[in-house]
Structure formats: structure tokens, C-alpha cells
Amino acid sequence: MNEINEQIPFTESNIDKQNYLASLLSLCYANKVISETKLNEIRIGLDKAFVETAEQYTKRASSTISKKRAELLYSSVLYQADIYLLSLHSYQKAIDELKTLSVEDILEKGKECIMQLHEVNIKIFKRVYSSRLNVLYYEYNYVIEKSFDEYCKNYSARFDAKNCCASIDYPLLGCQAYEIKSQGIMFIYEYYTGIMLENEFCKYFSKEQIETIIVKFGKIYSDNYSELLFNISEVLFNNFLACLLVDKSGFELLITEKDVDNISNRFVLYSEEDLYSEIKKKFSLYQKQIQNPQLYQYLKKYIIKFTNEILNKIKNECLDEFLVV
Amino acid sequence: MSFELMPEFSSRNIVNYNLINEIMETNEKSEEYGFALLEKDAEMIVKVGKEAMTVHDRIEIGKSVTVKIIEKFIQSTYISPREYAETIAKLIEIFYEVKEESLDFLDDDELIEIMFNFFETQSMGSLELLQSRDMDYLCQQIRKTAYGILEDEQKKEEFFDE
């Protein structure tokens, strides 16, 4: 592995994961990691796969397609390769595969990965559905009741692989749906994995606890929470973390005005780094109670955003707009 | 210099067939009808086809449709030997325009058949009428159907008929 590392003068961070093959080949070309002959062979292989895809698209009854459609079809071919190469979890391995396998083989393996990922997505969604929250919140209920069906019904890995074909507005914890960089089937995987973990987190609280918090949250902005676009677990987790800051134990959500004052007074002089360490330390005590390590890591990732947000609100003296009191 | 993977769809065809030779080979059949193309005519037709594809932002993915258009239209009662090359070139232009404007609703054979029927029975050999009246009307109807407008208009008419 070390020998390979020495030969490749760029790192994983230089590669655009959303255009993995194109980006990787570009770097290989610039750094002469793959021979020009092999690169041309790859380009010809991709062109050939594109023509075959385009002919399938027109059912071999049309000699011409629009440039826009051609770009979608070509990006679908590239996406198949991207999925396989990304599944190797190593750009060195990806380069080795590009050097040794034909484009046809790489695309075939990509198709297999897509099929497997689709099966995984179905399993994830089943878990999402069985753990769904009983809330009267349209955006949340839409991604549970409709969006996944839209994806299953309309997704085409062959002709429009980067489009997930589902309408999704409900955000994830700390992240709007449109901010997710993955595309197509990978987007669905990432999104519903998030929803699955968030549902699991919400199960630590009773239906009444959840409802009390989101109804109050709605009142901060308007009368009805269902008219807002927000993430349920984010609202709960904000309050949960705030409870940790005032040394409440267990899975507590209720914050009083006195607690808000306490937080403001106690942490107003904290740097972002210090507060982040403090929250992380307090949250680490829950590692055992949150039995799923994937969920623990998922929630932990949000702490940095929470820290930033809570410090801003303390400074602007509007913590009660951030926490549900 | 960077390594560009995405083909430059607007300027190059993915499959490069020897189109000029194929066009010249159609002379064997067209001579039976009293038409023939010179090599410079074939070059002009290829050029017009490529330009039409560029104008309409399209690319060729398989065998060119030019030969099919020639083979169909040599049967026309309205094409004169003197204007043969220009007529074919114009028909190719119309073909790509209609392909784009009809949202790719029709496949090659269907579109050529429709163009031929309009040319023979509606526009009576007038390329201007074929393009600006008949094919334009067809494209409008297809687009209206695709966008659901036609259905709405029909519903409105039915409503008032009642």
C-alpha cells in the first residue's frame, strides 16, 4: 500500500465524490498516473456505453436525441462507474481497477452495486416506516408515505441515475435536504438512513413529550408547527443538549426560563471550542444508553452546529428563540 | 490541458459513419426516378444536417437519418431533379426542427412518414407550407397534449357543448 501511496501525488480530498470517475481520471491524467492509451481506452469504452444507453432510450427508433438528454444519459453511465469505484472506499483501489478492468466490467459491477443498494434502501425504509412518528406534520409524513414510493416507481439508474425522482423537503438533523451532496440512489440511502436514525432517537421520548415540544416550537414562529419547515429531532435534540448543560439527567426535554438564564450566564464567556468540549463530554455519558453506535455518532456530528448556534443566541440574547421553553 | 470526459455533444457525433458514401449510394435507387446527387451535393446535405443538429442542440447517436429521408422522398411526385439536393437538405432541416419541437414524441420512421404524407397531400410539395404550417401545427398539438393543455381545451369545449 505504501508503494502505491508514493506513486499517487494526490489524495482522496482532491477528488470530487459527486463526479468521482471524471474527477479521478482528470487527476490521473494531470499527474500521469494512468497512461494516455489507457485513458483513451476508458473514454472510448464510456462513449460506447453511452451510445448503447442512448439507443436503449430511444428503443433504437431514433437516430438523434437532444443534447440535454444526451448529457443525462452520459452522466448516468458515469454514475454507474462512480457507484462501483466509491464502493471500494479507496482511491488507490479505484485506480487499480481502472488500470486493470475494462469499462464494461466496471459498469457491470456498478449496476450490481446499484441493485444491492436499492435492496438496502428498501430495508432501511421498512425500518423507517415501522418506527415512524405519529405526528400531524405534512412534510414529515410526506417523506414517509409518498417520497419513497415515488423513488421506487420512477427512479431510473439507466437513463437518469443522478435524479432520485422523489419530492423531499423535510430536512435532516442539521441539514436541509437540498444540502445533501449525494445524488440519485445514494441520496435516498443517505437521506433515509438519517430519517431511520432520527426516528430511533425520537423513540427515547414519549409521544406526549414530543408533541409538547413541537407544539411549543411552532408557537415561537407561528401558531401551528405544521406550517413550518423544520426537523423534529433537531428541535428535540437542541432541548436535550440544553438540559445536559444545566445538568439535568436522563432523556429530558423540558427547559424552563430559569434554565435559559442559567445557560446564558454560565456559558456567555465560553469559547466555541471550550463549549464544544463541554457538551461533547456531557453527551459522551449517553454513549451506553444510546445503544446504537451509528445513532450516537450521527447525533454527535450535530453538536458542533449546536455549539455555534447556542453561542450566537447567547450573544444576541435570544436563546429563547432557539430552545423551546 | 485537462482530461475532458464528457463528449462535446454539440460539435461531434458519437458514431462516425461514412455518410457521404452512403448518400452517394442512394443514387442507384434515385436514378430510377430520374434523380441523382453529385458528391458536392452530398457534402452540402451532410453540412446542412450537422448545422441543423447544432441549431437545435441535438446529437446523432446512430446511423444518420439522411439516407432514410432520401429513400422515402424520391417517391414524391413533387420533387424535381433540378431542386433535388436543395429539397433533401431542407427536408433534413425540417426533420431536426420537428424532432426537437415535438419533444421527441415521434420516432424517425413515424416522423418521415408523416412528413411525406403532409408533403404529398397537404402542402402539395411546398417546403414552406410543410414547415411553417403543417409540421408546426403537428408540433403544437403534440406539445399541447404533452403539457395537458389540449385535454383542458377539449374539456372546456365539452363543457360548453353541454
Image (cartoon, grey):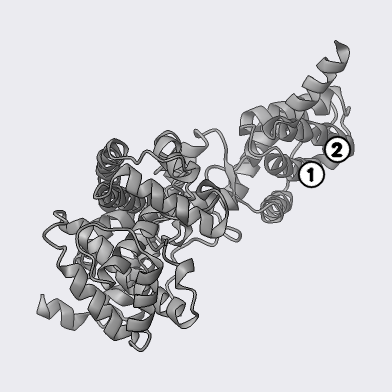
Amino acid type of the residue tagged 2 in the rendering? Leu
What is the quadrant of the N terminus of chain A in the image? bottom left
Label 2: which residue? Answer: B127
| Numbered circles on residues, count | 2
Query: Residue B120 falls in which quadrant of the image?
Result: top right
Q: Tag 1: Cα neighbours inside 10 Å, few (<14), some, or many (≥20)?
A: some
Place of residue B155 in the rendered image (x, y in percent of width and height, measured from the top left): 78, 20
Label 1: which residue? Answer: B90
- In this picture, residue B80 sits left or right of residue B38: right
Q: Answer yes or no: is residue B14 visible.
A: no
What is the quadrant of the C terminus of chain A in the image? bottom left
Query: Residue A260 falls in which quadrant of the image?
Result: bottom left
Q: Chain under label 2? A: B
Query: Residue B68 falls in which quadrant of the image?
Result: top right
Amino acid type of the residue tagged 1 in the rendering? Lys
Place of residue A25 in the rendered image (x, y in percent of width and height, measured from the top left): 34, 69
- Dot 1 and dot 2 residues touching (CB under 8 Å): yes
